[in-house]
Image (tube, grey):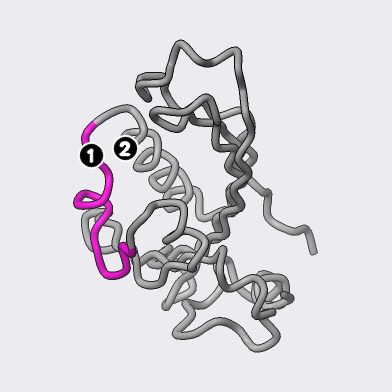
């Protein structure tokens, strides 16, 4: 997908998308999310890929993050991650791991988030992609109740391309 690369060369932020960019491969659509940044840094899911729906066990399209994420450390993490992306106006890549309640399996998540803009200056939308991998972890049986927190293992803010 070359859309963000071509836009980055001309303006600080890519333009907001009304639909996936031309050339987006259908196999990528299940892992994509499109998030609106509302006034006061409110966040609302505009589009949710089917892979996200499968993992979350629900479709959160049109719902605010405040509705979707219960109070707690993961909610705080997600809001802080989006705040950083919006303020810096730079793509962010993360990797992390979380337990699955009632199971010895763990969910590994790789996430790329790209800020988009309707005015070329303010990040008012985020295009994201998330890939999930489930793995068994017999050493983590003591956390079968889901009390173990999400742990971020990698975070990279992607610097602006040099001309």
Q: Quadrant of residue 37?
A: bottom left
Measured in 3D between alpha carbons, the distance from the residue under mark 1 to the one under mark 2, in whole angstroms, is 6 Å
x and y percentages locating residue 80 in the rendered image: 38, 38
| Residue 147 pos. (x, y %) | 35, 20
Residue 148 coordinates in the image, percent (x, y): 42, 19
Quarter holding the N terminus is: bottom right
**Mark 1 lies on residue:** 70
Q: Is residue 132 above or below residue 13?
A: above
What residue is drawn where x is 55% and y is 31%? 106
Whichever of labels 1 and 2 marks the residue nearer the N terminus, that label is 1
Residue 128 in the image, given as x and y percentages of width and height: 53, 60
Q: In this figure, which residue is indicated by the disc labeled 2?
A: 75
Q: Residue at x 56, y 63 (%)?
A: 31
Quarter of the figure with residue 124: bottom left
Up the image or down, 95 lies above or below 122; here it is above
Work out whether residue 140 or residue 161 is closer to the camera in this orientation and state it. Answer: 140
**Which residue ends up furthest to the right in the rendered image?**
163
| 72 with respect to 153 (left or right) | left
For mark 1, give the secondary structure.
Answer: loop
At x 32%, y 34%, the residue is 76
Bounds of the magenta segment: 59-71
Q: Secondary structure at mark 2?
A: helix
Q: Nearer the viewer, mark 1 or mark 2?
A: 1
The answer to the question of whether label 1 and label 2 lie on touching residues, with beta carbons closer than 8 A, is: yes
């Amino acid at each position: 997908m070359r859309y963000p690369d071509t836009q980055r060369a001309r303006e600080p932020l890519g333009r907001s998308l009304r639909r996936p960019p031309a050339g987006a491969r259908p196999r990528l659509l299940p892992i994509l999310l499109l998030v609106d940044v509302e006034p006061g840094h409110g966040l609302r899911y505009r589009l949710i890929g089917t892979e996200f729906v499968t993992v979350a066990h629900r479709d959160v399209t049109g719902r605010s993050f405040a509705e979707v994420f219960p109070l707690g450390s993961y909610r705080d993490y997600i809001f802080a991650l989006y705040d950083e992306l919006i303020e810096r106006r730079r793509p962010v890549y993360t990797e992390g791991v979380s337990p699955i309640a009632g199971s010895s399996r763990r969910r590994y998540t790789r996430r790329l988030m790209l800020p988009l803009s309707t005015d070329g200056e303010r990040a008012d939308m985020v295009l994201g992609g998330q890939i999930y991998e489930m793995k068994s972890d017999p050493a983590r049986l003591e956390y079968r109740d889901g009390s173990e927190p999400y742990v971020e293992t990698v975070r990279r803010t992607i610097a602006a391309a040099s001309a």
